[in-house]
Amino acid sequence: MARSDGSSFFRRSNSFWIVTISLSLAFYTCSVFWPELIPFSSLGPFGALVKHLVDNHYPVLYYGWYLTWIIHLLEALFAMKLCSDKGIHSSSTRLLWFVQTFLFGFASLGLLVKYSPDGRSKRH
């Protein structure tokens, strides 16, 4: 149970985003490292586009894959700064924010950005 001072505040990302981002990153990973496993012809126009990218622009996909994970790492590090700024001091809670943000990026970071330790939520 979270303490009322907010030092253990954590919210899990929405299941929709967890599934969507996980499947997207898995597809991207397979496209870059194991394209022979993907049935491009069964995916319609999307499959044709990805097949074209794999065949003709592989370096962009390859370096883009690494860039994706670097961006996720930077988001996770930013989440650590936000935890400090918002008074979330529990080591286990900070680790949860780091891991969740590293894996799901904006879907996690958005929850932390919206959190207001004084109880007022930042909604638009």
Image (cartoon, helix red, strand yellow):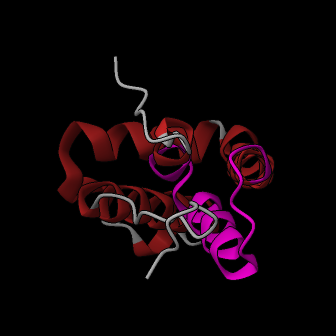
Residue 81 image point, x, y percent: 80, 47
Residue 5 magenta = no
- For the magenta stretch, what is the residue range? 84-109
Residue 97 image point, x, y percent: 62, 64
Residue at the spot 44% in from the left edge and 41% down from the top edge: 119
Picture layout, residue 11 above or below residue 122: below
Among all residues in the image, which is located at the extreme top?
124
Seen in the image, is 20 located left or right of residue 76?
Answer: left
Along the line of sight, the residue nearer the viewer: 112 or 104: 112
Seen in the image, is 28 located left or right of residue 91?
Answer: left
Residue 97 magenta = yes
* Numbered label tally: 0
Residue at the spot 49% in from the left edge and 65% down from the top edge: 4
Picture layout, residue 56 above or below residue 109: above
Along the line of sight, the residue nearer the viewer: 3 or 59: 3
Residue at the spot 76% in from the left edge and 78% down from the top edge: 91
Along the line of sight, the residue nearer the viewer: 9 or 63: 9
Residue 124 image point, x, y percent: 34, 16
Residue 7 image point, x, y percent: 64, 65
Image quadrant where one finds the N terminus: bottom left
* Main SS class of the magenta portion in the image: helix
